[in-house]
Image (spheres, grey):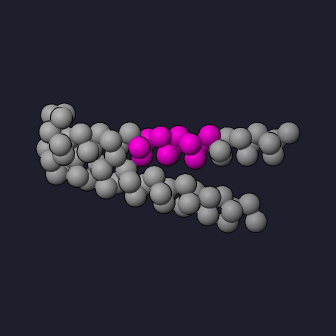
């Protein structure tokens, strides 16, 4: 049962990472488009960081877990 719990926790952590990255990217795009108050540079950084994190964050976490399970 502990193995199933660990797998479920990892799955939900991956989903949380993706959700946070999507929120960061959308907020960054809104700042860049001047729909939300903020510096355009900050908006660009948030957009790029959110996009990169969305694609590579879960991969890096999975690689880390794969290495620590051995």
Residue furthest right in the image: 1
From the viewer's perspective, is residue 27 above or below residue 45? Answer: above
* Magenta span of residues: 12-22
Name the one closer to the observer, 70 or 50. 50
Would you identify the image quadrant in which residue 65 lies?
bottom right
- Quadrant of the rendering where the N terminus is positioned: top right
Residue furthest top in the image: 36
Query: Relative to 53, is 33 on the left or the right?
Result: left
Residue at 44% across, 41% down: 20
Q: Which percent across, then down, holds residue 18? A: 49, 46
Residue at 69% across, 62% down: 66
Query: Relative to 69, is 28 on the left or the right?
Result: left
Name the one closer to the observer, 28 or 4. 28
Would you identify the image quadrant in which residue 36 lies?
top left
Is 47 covered by the magenta stretch?
no
Q: Which percent across, then down, holds residue 60? A: 54, 61
Residue at 24% across, 39% down: 30
Q: Which percent across, then down, holds residue 17? A: 50, 45
Q: Which percent across, then down, holds residue 50? A: 37, 50
Name the one closer to the observer, 29 or 24. 29
Name the one closer to the observer, 54 or 62. 54
- Quadrant of the rendering where the C terminus is positioned: bottom right
Q: How many marks?
A: 0
Would you say the magenta stretch is mainly helix, strand or loop? helix
């Amino acid at each position: 049962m502990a193995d199933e719990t660990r797998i479920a926790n990892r799955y939900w952590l991956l989903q949380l990472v993706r959700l946070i990255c999507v929120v960061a990217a959308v907020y960054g795009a809104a700042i860049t488009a001047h729909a939300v108050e903020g510096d355009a540079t900050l908006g660009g950084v948030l957009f790029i960081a959110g996009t990169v994190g969305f694609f590579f964050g879960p991969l890096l976490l999975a690689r880390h877990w794969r290495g620590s399970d051995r």
